[in-house]
Image (cartoon, coloured by chain):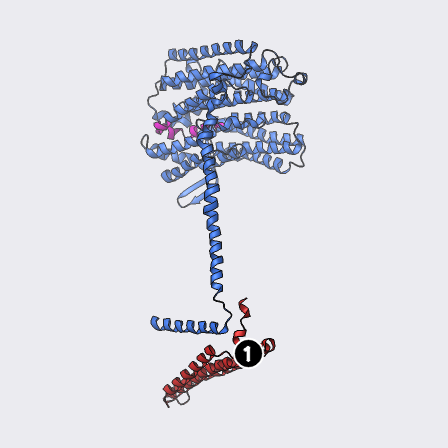
Chain colours: A blue, B red
Amino acid sequence: MSKLVYLVPLFPLIGFLINGLGRKNLTKSLTGIIGSGVVLISFIISVVLFFEVKAGHSEVVTYFDFITAGSLKIPFAFQVDQLSSIFLLIITGVGFLIHVYSTAYMHEESSAHYARYFSYLNLFVFSMLLLVLGANYLIMFIGWEGVGLCSYLLIGDFGFLLALFWMIQQFGTLSFSDVFSKAGGMKMNDVALVGITMLLFVGATGKSAQIPLYTWLPDAMAGPTPVSALIHAATMVTAGIYMIARSNLLYTLAPTTQGVVAVIGLATAILAATIALKQNDIKKVLAYSTVSQLGYMFLGLGVGAYTGAVFHVMTHAFFKALLFLGAGSVIHAMHHEQDIRKMGGLAKRLPTPHWTFLVGCIAIAGIPPLSGFFSKDEILAAAFSANTVYWVVGVLGAVLTAFYMFRLYATTFLGKFRGSHEQAHHLHESPAAMTWPLVILAILAAISGFVGVPAALGGHHELEHFLSPIFAGSVKLSHEQHALSHATEYMLMGVSVGAAIIAILYAVSRFSKKPDLEEAQGFGKVLQNKWYVDELYDIVFVRPLRTLSGFLNSIVEKSGIDGMVNGVGRLVNYGGRQLRLLQSGQVGAYILMMVVAALVLFIIQLFVQ
Amino acid sequence: MTINHYIFLSVALFCIGIIGVLTRRNMIIIFMCIELMLNATNLLLVAFSKMHYLAASVTDAATTAGTDGQLFVFFIMVVAAAEVSVGLAIIVMMYRNTHSIDVNFLNRLKH
């Protein structure tokens, strides 16, 4: 069966081709069935693969030699193991639900646009599957660029590319297994290892929206909401996490890079959380929340809690897709109104989005027993054992998360309706194709945490056992894995949950009655304007670049390049004018020239011999 | 007569031809001077041809050495005849147009 793993990405590719090429001829319902159906088939195969892997059949399937140059051989191969099978399930499962949701959400579009929309979604799923399945860094990079092509082309990819070159130079191969076995023989913090991991991390910061390259993600919210859910919340942005989790051995061997990863992740988590406090666009809040949660995942990777990071990717995929789709339902019902100040009191009018959104909020806030609690707690516990400061800042971020999520919830769903009469008249429950994915995702967001119940709470942490073959090498290397005592863990959980509950109660009590409708003042204004980071980037990067381009355009281009080209032309012109004078028309002069030239030739001949 | 005499004669004829071409303005004269140069060459070719034949016939009575030189002479004569016919036609046309055969009148090509 695992020989058939190529079918998993193949079906979305077929869907892309059918919908892309036949977009003028297909009806909307057929497009929707094809677009969702191919992802469903991939999901079914992924489930089968998952159970095979669970039974112990992880392997690398090689199809053909992709590149052969001298001693460098890069096969086109897929790797089916614990890590990739989990990601396959997330991508195809959540992806399928989002496709189904889209069939209703995009129904107002013309059929050609509708088909193009689905073809791009399918292409995206295909690229993402390629990224996850690749058995070497090159295939991963192809998928990496593919998903970038479908959403945002990012500068960080340059770092990934450089890391690939360095790896070829250092190890002579790009296959995961070969690279890891060769790296295993190197000493800790080797320059090459630190360099390669740093460059890979630069790629990851771009794709996964970390400081300083996070600003694109909130800007990418212009697209339809299901796209935001699929690309910018559930799957693509986790590509950076996947890549580092896949390369966990390299990172464990380079503690310097790990420290950088942890600090950057933590800084991003707290910065994005503070920005989200004051945003009034429902999607912007969720976007900054995504950036913040990705920061937690990087914190987990940085402190060596690889399982925790993957766990959080999984739970985050469920509850963030849920939140985005819930927000999509609200926006749909409100006729494309995204400003939460003009909503309010939607709980009674939109019961399904309301309840599911509430589940998502509780999950992301980290309240037990919903999924977010377990994954976030695991990362925070690992952060605590690495460095207490990490934990304190992390808990602060978690409190902020709880606060802004319930500010969003209370402002949107509680209190009085603040929209126009027309909107009030048209408020309606979403169609079944939109509510069912919400319900399924809500159930998943609620219960998916139970696959990783820590030992302190009497669980077995099945996810950790399942993923242990992937991270075995790293676990062996990091000797100082001092397990926390159960008492300490209870204390950590108690503090973070208690603080989160206080934040939630405060937010609900404050914003349900009297939402802050006025423009923010003072420090709040700084937060509302995202710490003025966009403006800072504008001054530091965009304007100097513009000035430089302007200088090149007006000075170098005009007087340098143009001058050179025109100068050549003028030189030829002038030379021709002067040479023309030789042509006197006097036959005698011509003959004289001929004779003189012949004489000169004779004389040269004489001297040469 | 040694070969030297032939060489001197043909060089003299050739130089007369060059000087005539360079100095005279009458087109007919220039034409005749060109013929003079061609024939100076012909003379030289024939002289060398004969010299080679004599040198070779000492050892081999049936030698054909030097025939190629004579062949060249015939070629040059044919080419010269063709050239004369074309050249004279040009001169006739020129006279019809300008009522002169002075080459200095023929300078309109520069424009």
- State the image quarter where residue A515 is shown: top right
Image x and y of residue B27, in percent: 52, 79
Q: Residues within 10 Å of mark 1 (few under 14, many from 20)?
A: many
Which residue occupies the foreground of this view, B30 or A152? B30
Q: For residue A236: magenta?
A: no
What is the x, y in percent for residue A52? 49, 28
Q: What residue range appears in magenta?
A: A237-258
- Secondary structure under the numbered disc 1 in the rendered image: loop
Asked if residue A81 can be seen in this view, the reply is: no
Outermost residue toward the left in this view:
A187
Q: Main secondary structure of the magenta part?
A: helix
Give the x, y percent position of residue A383: 39, 19
Q: Is residue B74 visible?
A: yes
The residue at 48%/74% (across/down) is A588
Q: Amino acid at mark 1?
A: Ile
Above/below status of A459 relative to A238: above
Q: Chain of mark 1?
A: B
How far from the left and from the top, in percent, is residue A28?
66, 31
Quadrant assignment for the C terminus of chain A: bottom left
Residue bearing mark 1: B101
